[in-house]
Image (cartoon, rainbow, N blue to C red):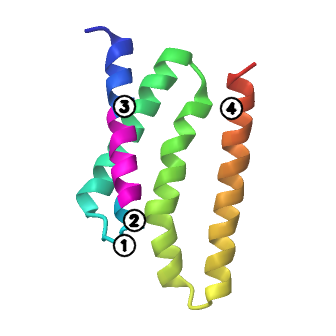
Amino acid sequence: MNFKSITLVLEMLLFVIGVAGCIMMFMQMVLPTSMLTIITMLLIICSAFEFIKTKKLRKLVYPIIITYFSVGMPIIEKLTNNEVFFVGFAILGCVITIIFVYNDLIITNK
């Protein structure tokens, strides 16, 4: 089994776990902490493999984005008592993520 097929298997596993997580959220089920940990670890591993394969540093930003939303946002929510600040941080994080992903897709498709 070569390096490319390992990356492909990990990406497919990450996709399946992500779809299962979205289905659980739509069914208003609580996501297990272990599931979030597994998703974060798989994303870090896949991003590291992509970085090694493409030598593009921007591939390592995706785990930082996921960590911000899964760890940073709950901490910000507990630290700020004002709902407006929390929504502002959430919107700012989403806008930055959308801009980064859009730029990454444009660069990748050239």
| Earlier residue among tags 3 and 1 | 3
Q: CA distance from mark 4 to mark 2?
A: 27 Å
Q: Quadrant of residue 24?
A: bottom left
- Give the amino acid type for the residue marked by disc 1 in the picture: Gln
Above or below residue 53? Residue 75 is: below
Secondary structure at numbered mark 4? helix
Q: Earlier in the sequence, mark 3 or mark 4?
A: 3
Q: Are marks 3 and 2 in contact (CB under 8 Å)?
A: no
Query: Closer to the N terminus: mark 4 or mark 1?
Result: 1
The stretch in magenta equals 13-23
Main SS type for the magenta part?
helix
| Residue bearing the label numbered 1 | 28
* Residues packed near mark 4 inside 10 Å, few (<14), some (14 to 19) or many (20 plus): few
Contact (CB < 8 A) between labels 3 and 1? no
Amino acid type, callout 2: Met
Q: What is the number of the mark on residue 2?
A: none
Find out whether the residues at labels 3 and 4 contact each other: C-beta distance under 8 Å. Answer: no
> In the rendered image, which residue does mark 4 sit on?
105
Q: Which mark is residue 12?
A: 3
Based on the picture, tell me whether residue 1 belongs to the magenta stretch.
no
Tell me the tag on residue 25.
Answer: 2
> In the rendered structure, which disc, 4 or 2, sits on the residue that comes first in sequence?
2
For the residue carrying disc 3, how many other residues have a C-alpha within 10 Å: few (<14), some (14-19), or many (20+)? few
The 10 Å Cα crowd at callout 1, few under 14, some 14 to 19, many 20 or more, is: few
Residue at 39% over, 65% down: 25
Q: Of helix, strand and loop, which one carries label 2?
A: helix
**In the image shown, does 9 or 90 lie closer to the viewer?**
9
